Amino acid sequence: MSAVPFSHNTTASNQGARSAEGATASTAPVAAAVAHAVDSGAAHGSAGVAGMQPDFDLARVRADFPILSEVRVHGRPLVYLDNAASSQMPQAVIERIVRYQRSGHANIHRGVHYLSDQATNAFEAARSTVRAFLNACEDREIIFTSGTTEAINLVASSWGRSALQPGDEIILSELEHHANIVPWQMVCDEKGARIRVIPVTDSGELDLEAYRRLFNARTRLVGVAHVSNALGTVNPVQEMISIAHAYGVPVLVDGAQAVPHETVDVQALDCDFYAFSGHKLYGPTGIGVLYGRAALLEQMPPYKGGGDMILSVSFEKTTYNHIPHKFEAGTPAIMPAIALAAAIDYVNGIGLPRMGAWEQHLLAHATARLAAIEGVRIIGTAPHKAAVLSFNIGNVHPHDVGSLLNDEGIAVRTGHHCAQPVMKRFGVPATVRASFAFYNTLAEVDLLADAIGRIKTLFE
Ligand SMILES: Cc1ncc(COP(=O)(O)O)c(C=O)c1O
């Protein structure tokens, strides 16, 4: 991803009265209102915004996501800026789910009948789609999990329990999501190992010099987010991996916030593990992926026991299945895996570079607009960021900001974003976080900025 220079000031008005009405179902006028909002984004073409157009048909893309036009919040069109928490699902994925449930569902891997065969093929084809998406070498390096959290727990539990010894060290960064902290604390407590932390600079970047100094003969693993969910920082994971490998240390990359925004190539990165979640990539909840280098996965003991992960079982001895099945005990999330593949197909149809480029425009515009509001503090100002904007308005509690924005139909996340250490680093208990997807518009960014301006005035 390349950073786009910050610029562009526009004004948009959003003076409509508030309504107490909650989210309701679709109406044509709402679609028209959204279309108007999209148009008005283009119409606010002064100061460079006119030059900002996505390299795809934004109106058509928005029409792919029914929720964007069908939901009204307090009488207003939904402005969905909580994509880092969970993104919305396009019609193509919804239809794939319906098709699978209507005519393709059966349990997989162990049936000889037609439907089981069909479902098995679709499930394994989904694995191949994910393999190609990450450019992994082999399908067997792709393990389906329930999400990023489970993928990291799998590595911490299986690799950690077998590889860690008392006195060993794991390097994590100060900006990790709790999902890439707590599983390591659990296994380190159990094994007498300890966690060392890469500090974050004032702009929200990892201090690479400090990182280099953390390595020693006891270092066993590095775990690092590709993109920070709280700050948006894109970490230089390729460089970090090559530093770790120079010490013979494997690296787990938490890619939950990266895969929706940029092309990830696990071979080019040369990472040892890579984890992500389907629901942040326009797919369903309940499905995620752990990529693991085959040689490592083969050495690792199973994570959970049960059906499908065995070759034979007796009370005397059980032999385990080959990877990836060794790590997929029990009936997996069949439909969500198939739907994830449909989401990847959808994303590939538009192209992550195009999507990412538009998101960079949205981020640049949002950053410029918010930075121009006195009293707004942006937390996370690294030059290389994904489409996440964390901020606070003076001493106003982020939850108050979030609920006032909600009154205007604008969905953002407020809180510590499951990243309490980095909140502490910046001396705040919480932030307001707007996170953009490729289906967001400049007009939506303006609605956010205008609302923030009004909220700021309200609390003066
Ligand atoms: C960077 C990062 N890692 C891990 C997670 C956990 O993902 P999930 O809850 O889908 O397992 C998230 C979710 O927000 C995240 O942003």
Image: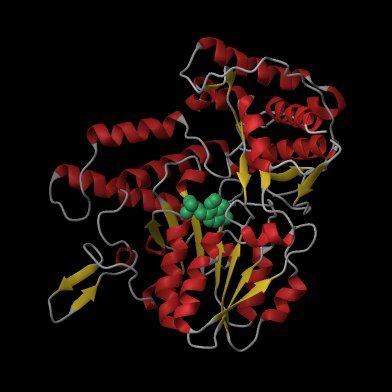
Locate residue 329: give its quadrant.
bottom left
Query: Is any part of residue 412 visible from this angle?
Result: yes
User: 213 or 298, which lies in front?
Assistant: 213
Locate residue 371: give its quadrant.
top right
- Above or below, 114 against 47 in this view is below
Answer with left or right where residue 201 lies relative to residue 196.
right
User: 125 or 201, which lies in front?
Assistant: 201
Q: Position of residue 164 (x, y in %)?
A: 47, 83
What residue appears at the point 22 percent right and 51 percent down from the top-left corner?
Answer: 108
What residue appears at the point 42 percent right and 60 percent down from the top-left corner?
Answer: 150
Answer with left or right where residue 107 lies relative to residue 93.
left
Residue positioned most to the top? 29
Q: Please tell me how many numbered marks the rendered image carries.
A: 0
Locate residue 83: give its quadrant.
top right
Q: Position of residue 145 (x, y in %)?
A: 39, 57
What residue appears at the point 71 percent right and 25 percent down from the top-left corner?
Answer: 443
User: 38 or 374, which lies in front?
Assistant: 374
Answer with left or right where residue 398 lies relative to residue 183.
right
Placement of the C terminus among the 4 image quadrants? top right
Q: Position of residue 332 (x, y in %)?
A: 30, 53
Answer with left or right where residue 374 lies relative to residue 181.
right
